[in-house]
Amino acid sequence: MLGYSSKADLLRADLARDIYVRSGDRSAVIAAILCRTETSFQTEVSWRRKDGLVLDVVLHGRRLSRPRRGEPLFEVMAEDVTARRRAERETAAALKLQSDFVSFVSHQLRTPLTGIRWMLELAQQTPGLPEETAQCLADARQSADRLVGLIADMLNVARCESGKTRWVPEEVDLAELTASVMHELRPQVEQREHQMSFRPDAHVPRVQADANLLRQVMLNLCSNAIKYTPVGGEITITAGLRGAEIWWSVRDNGMGVPLEARSRLFEKFFRADNAHTVETEGTGLGLYWVRRILAQGGGRVWWQPAPAKGGASASPGSVFTFALPLQPTLVQGVAQ
Amino acid sequence: MSHATILLVEDDRILRRACETGLRQRGWNVVTAEDGERALSLAFLQRPSLILLDLLMPKLPGLEALRLLRSDAATAHIPVLILSNSSRPSDREEAQRLGAKEYFVKSEFSLQALGEAVARHLEAATAEETP
C-alpha cells in the first residue's frame, strides 16, 4: 500500500518524518497500543506513500496476548479508504456549491418579486377599480405569493442538504406552537370554508425541539391538509404522549394519497398524481424537507389513511403524524 | 404621530418607491437614501423617528451602517427595522446583536404589515420618551 519495494526498504523509512503526515496521528496510535484497558482500537490516519501521495488510512487494531512475556501486542490491519474519503469530500463540496448557488439566486429573485408584490398591493388600493381588474390583480398577487413559497422551499432544502440547518432544541409547548400555526393559517382555512380544530390529550408534556423548525413542519403539514381537502372540509389536530415519544397528528377528510404514491410520498420532488388536480405546478419538496428536518431532531414522520367513517366509499382523507422523543438521546455527550 | 419622519434606506428604485408610497399613505413624512453613506448623513441631519434599513447596499453595507448608527449618541436611540431579502440566520442574529428592533424578509411581508410594524415601534418609542 505504501509503495515500498520490500519490508527492509520500509523499515529504512523514518515513520514520523516520511510516513505519518500529521504528528498527532502517530502519537494517537502509540497511545492506543500502549493503553492497557482496551482490547481493540480503530483510528483514522494520513500516511504518505513512497512516491509522496497521501493516503487516508483506517487502522484496525486487535490485541494479541503473548503468555511468554505477558506483554500485550497488537495486530493492526491498515485499510486504504482514500477513494471513499475523496468521494465524500466531493459530495460535500457539490452540496455546498448547490447551496451557495441556491442562496445567491434566491436572494436575487426576491428583490424583483418584492417589487411585484408591493406594487400589486398599491394598485389594489386604487378606488373604483372595475371588477375584472380587481380580479386580475388578486390573481397576480396569488401567483406572486406562490413564488415566495417556492423560493423559501428551495432555500430550505438546499440549506438542509448542505448541512447548514441546525436543529437547536429548547423546551417547546406543542399546544402553544400549534395555536400559533393555526392562527397564521386562519385566512386560508376561512377561504376554503374548512373547520380546523385542535384536540390534544389532557396532558401533553413539553418536548425538547427546535421551535422554529418544528413550527415550519407544522405549517407545512397543515397547509397540505388545507390545500388538498375540498372546500368545506374538516381538519383535526391532535397531540399526546405515546411511551417515550410525543405524537402530533393532523387529520383531514380530503383527497388522500393514491396507493401507488404511498411509498414515495416523502421522496424529493415526488408529487402524487392527484396533487395535480389541485395545483399544476409544485416542487414536491415540502414533505421531503419535513422528513429530513425531523430526522435531524431525532424524530420521524409518516402517513396513514384517515379511518373511514362507516361505509364511506370515497377517500376518507389523510393523517400525517410526527413523533419526537421526549428527551433527546445523548450519544457520546452530544445531543442528537 | 403624523409628524414623525421615517428614514427609508433601500437601494432598489422600485422597492423604494413602493415603500415610500405606502408609508406616506399613513401620514408619515418620508426621506429616502439609496446607500449606507447617504443614510448616515440623513440620519444625523434629519433625526428621523424611525429608520427602515436594507442590508445589501453599495458604498456601505447595511450592517455596518447599523453599527455606526447605534454607536453614535445622536442616532443610537432611533429604532431601526431591517428590511432584507436575506433569510440567512447569521444576518438576522448579527442585526439583532447590533440592536435592530425587528428583522423583515421583504418578500414575505406586505406593505400593510410593514406599516403596522412601523406604527407599533413608533408608539413604543414615544411611550419611552414620555416621562
Image: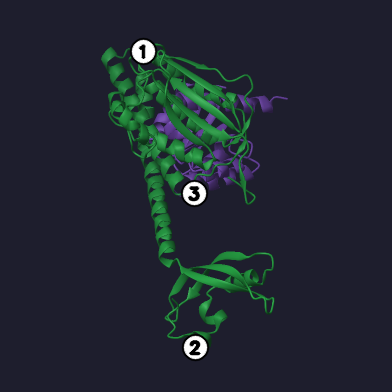
Query: Do tags 1 and 3 sit on the same chain?
Result: no
Which element carries disc 3, helix, strand or loop? loop
Depth check, front residue: A121 or A325: A325
Res. A220 in view: yes
Q: Which mark is residue B117?
A: none
Which element carries disc 2, helix, strand or loop? helix
Image quarter in which the C terminus of chain A is found = top right
Q: Which mark is residue A8?
A: 2
Colour of the chain lettered B? purple
Q: Chain of mark 1?
A: A
Position of residue B27 relative to residue B81, above or below, is above
Mark 2: few/some/many CA within 10 Å (<14, 14-19, 20+): few
Res. B109 in view: no
Q: Please identify the quarter of the rendering in which residue A246 is found.
A: top right
Q: Which residue is mark 3?
A: B60
Mark positioned earlier in the residue sequence (2 or 1): 2
Residue lying at 31% horizontally and 31% vertically, measured from the top left: A260
Which chain is represented by green in the image? A
Depth check, front residue: A306 or A142: A306
Residue A207 placement (x, y as % from top left): 61, 32
Query: Marks 2/1: CA distance?
Result: 82 Å
Residue B51 placement (x, y as % from top left): 54, 35
Q: Check contact, mark 1 vs mark 3: CB within 8 A.
A: no
Q: Chain of mark 3?
A: B
Position of residue A20 relative to residue A85, above or below, is below
Q: Which residue is mark 1?
A: A312
Query: Do tags 2 and 1 sit on the same chain?
Result: yes
Left or right, A329 with reference to B86? right
